[in-house]
Every structure is written in structure tokens, then in C-alpha cells.
Image (cartoon, rainbow, N blue to C red):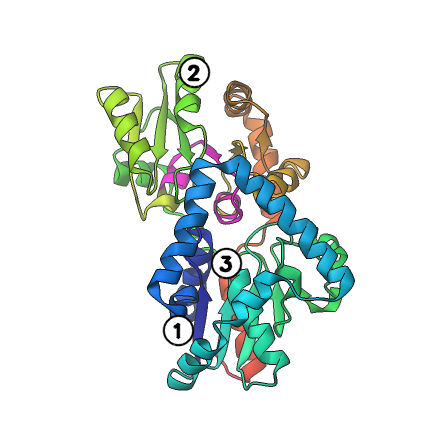
Amino acid sequence: MHVLVLSCNTGGGHNSAGSAVLEALQARGHTGERVDFLGLAGQKVSDLVCGAYVGMVKNLPAVFGVTYSVGRAVSTAERVLSVKSPVYAACAQVIPELNRYLSQHPCDAIIAPHTFPALALTEMKRRGMALPITVAVATDYTCTPFFEEEDCDFTLIPSQLCVDEFVRRGFSREKLVPLGIPVSDGFQRRLGRRTCREMLGLEQNCRWILIMGGSMGAGHIRQLVRCLLYLTPEQVRLAVICGSNGKLLEGLRKKYGHSSRIQVIGYTDQVARYMEACDLLYTKPGGITSTEGAVMGVPMVHMKPIPGCETRNRQLFTQNGMSVSARGVLAQAVKGWHLLDDPERCQRMTMAQRSQVAAGAAGRVVELLERQLGEVKPE
């Protein structure tokens, strides 16, 4: 079985979900590849769209929030009026390039962990164009604007907790497959806290707090670091992952480079091991990172969300006991310190995560495709 993952570079989450499926495919003896959907229309188009998105999220989050709200309203109105959105029409413009790619690179199934390729596949299906099995994957715990316009063969959603919202947004209940958000197998494997700390050079006899703002290093991380250093005793250490945010990395290293209480990390492929090594996780409420933390079973504090889908992610996690949060940075720091100092509450939180966030989603996606194609795991 050969599978094409069509993703976009608007943040790291969509690509991470796609990569997790590819990892699961390879583990079961199949093959796959990941392609940038917007890149099919030209690298300049991909860079322009993705650069604008990342720039708005990092530098103008309030503007992004307004844009998200407008998109949600437009999406709702168009669904009620049974008309297609401008976003749907724009994605359809890539169909000639996508069809050409598929004719040159045939596959047995297409996974779309992003709205844009899911909409293009929907329009190809509507036109009667030949397609393999198509699977749209929601990577947030909410139905994002325009996602309800997709009509792939299967729609994967993060949790049974999300079913009612997706139904309200126009999906039939039977179409939804709540398998979870695919995350790398590394978040399901355990090496042990002591081993992970030794691997990462973290002191063994301290309590460690991990702070991360997703692939972009977003959020009020500088302020949070200051608050936690003030609130917590000397024996508490901070590990801060800055992702691709070079400015944040440089600023933290310049200010705290000689401090024994902080380890500042840039881009790393060892996020799972840092999560396992630490006692508490601070993260922005992105769908992927929140799922990774829950699958790993780490007590979690959600920082201020990027307005939009992350607002809903945080709401669902806090309402179901899978994380805590607060409005301001100081309040978030206090909440986290109180959580870290309450082992029983931490245990209840990780139990809630285990019961409500599905682990192994990537493998179940592959099993779904195997059943549909009548294939079995190769020996």
C-alpha cells in the first residue's frame, strides 16, 4: 500500500500529524510520501500563504483571532445558504496540478491533515474525477472554518468529545471517525524519566517544568519564565523549547545563559523525551502539542491561546480535567506551581488524559486503510 499525505506548512502541527501516519505506515511495511499541497501551485504560492499565516499568528494574534471569527461566520452562512466559500474556490484552483501529480505518482489512499487539500479533493470527487480513498484529518478539537465543506471518504476527528460539535457544523454522525489526532510513536514509548534526563543532560534530583510554544515558539514565554523563577524554589528547574523562534532563543540565552535553573533549547526532535523527563508541561493549546502531552501523560498548563481554534482546544481540555489554565501569565504560573505541588491532582489529570485522548491514532488510520483496501500487514 502506498499513501500520499497532502499537507501545508501553516504551522508545524499539520505536517507532524502527516509524518506520524507515514511513520505508522512504514512500521507496518507500507510506503508513503508527504507533499506540500500549496507547493503544487508553485513554491512562491506556498511561501506567500504560509509566511502570511505564520507572520500573523506570531506578530498579530488578535488580528488572526478576528480573521478566524469572520471565517467562522462566513463558513456558517455559506453552509446555511448551500454555497461554496472563496476558500473552497481557491483550493479548487490547484486541482489541475494535483491531478497531474496523481497521474504521475499513483497511490492507494490520500491523507489530508489540512483543510486546503481536503477541499480540493472534495471538488475533484464532485467532478467525478478518479481518486483513491481520501481521508480528511481534523488536527484541532473543534471544527475549524471551512472544514465542514470537505466531503472526503472518511473524516477523522480527535475525540468522541468533539462529535456533537462536528454534527452541528453539518457533518453526519455516521461519517465521523473519532480515532484521535495522529502523533509520533515516540510519544507512546517510555524510556523512563531517569533515562530521559540523563540523555538530555537534565539534573536528576530536581523537579523540571517544560515550557514550549509549539513549532513557532509562540506565547508569552519570557514573562512566564520570569514569573516561575520568582514563584518556585531553587530546586525547580525550567526547560524552555523555543522551536523556530530564533529571537526568543537568543533573548533567553542572553539573559539566562549563566543560570543553573534554566536550559534553553532551540529546535529539537526530542520533544517526547523532554516531556517524559519533566514533571509539568506549559504549552500553548495547539491540537498536536496538547495531544502529544496527553498521550505522554504529563500534567499540563495551557498558556494563552492564539485566538480561534486554540481557544476551543483549551476549553475542551480544561472542562474535562485534562489541563488547567488561567487568563494572565502570573495566574498561569501560580496554577502550575500549585498543580506541581499536588501529586494527587496530577494523577487525576493524567488519568483524565488517558481516558479521553486516544493514543495510537496513526496506527489506527493505517489499519482503517488496510481494511478498506483488503490488505493485511505485510510479514
Earlier residue among tags 2 and 1: 1
| Crowd rating for badge 3 (residues with CA inside 10 Å; few <14, some 14–19, many 20+) | many
Tell me whether the residue at label 3 lies in contact with that at label 1, contact meaning CB atoms closer than 8 angstroms. no
In magenta stretch: residue 277: yes
Foreground: 85 or 199?
85
Foreground: 71 or 325?
71
CA gap, disc 3 to disc 1?
A: 15 Å
In x, y percent, where is residue 5? Answer: 44, 69
- Looking at the rendered structure, the kind of residue marked 2 is Thr
In magenta stretch: residue 252: no
CA gap, disc 2 to disc 1?
A: 47 Å
- Tag 1, which secondary structure? strand
Foreground: 219 or 301?
219
Residue picked out by circle 3: 182
Residue picked out by circle 1: 32
Foreground: 169 or 213?
169
CA gap, disc 3 to disc 2?
A: 35 Å
- Tag 3, which secondary structure? loop
Q: Nearer the viewer, mark 2 or mark 1?
A: 1
Which residue corresponds to the image point at 34% horizontal and 41% vertical from the top-left? 243
Which residue corresponds to the image point at 33% horizontal and 46% vertical from the top-left? 270
| Crowd rating for badge 2 (residues with CA inside 10 Å; few <14, some 14–19, many 20+) | few
- Looking at the rendered structure, the kind of residue marked 1 is Gly
In the picture, the quarter occupied by the C terminus is: bottom left
Which residue corresponds to the image point at 42% horizontal and 51% vertical from the top-left? 12
Q: Which span of residues is magenta-colored?
A: 274-294
In the picture, the quarter occupied by the N terminus is: bottom left
Q: Is residue 178 visible?
A: no
The correct choice, above or below, for 215 with respect to 19 in the image is: above
Residue picked out by circle 2: 232
| Image quarter of residue 201 | top left
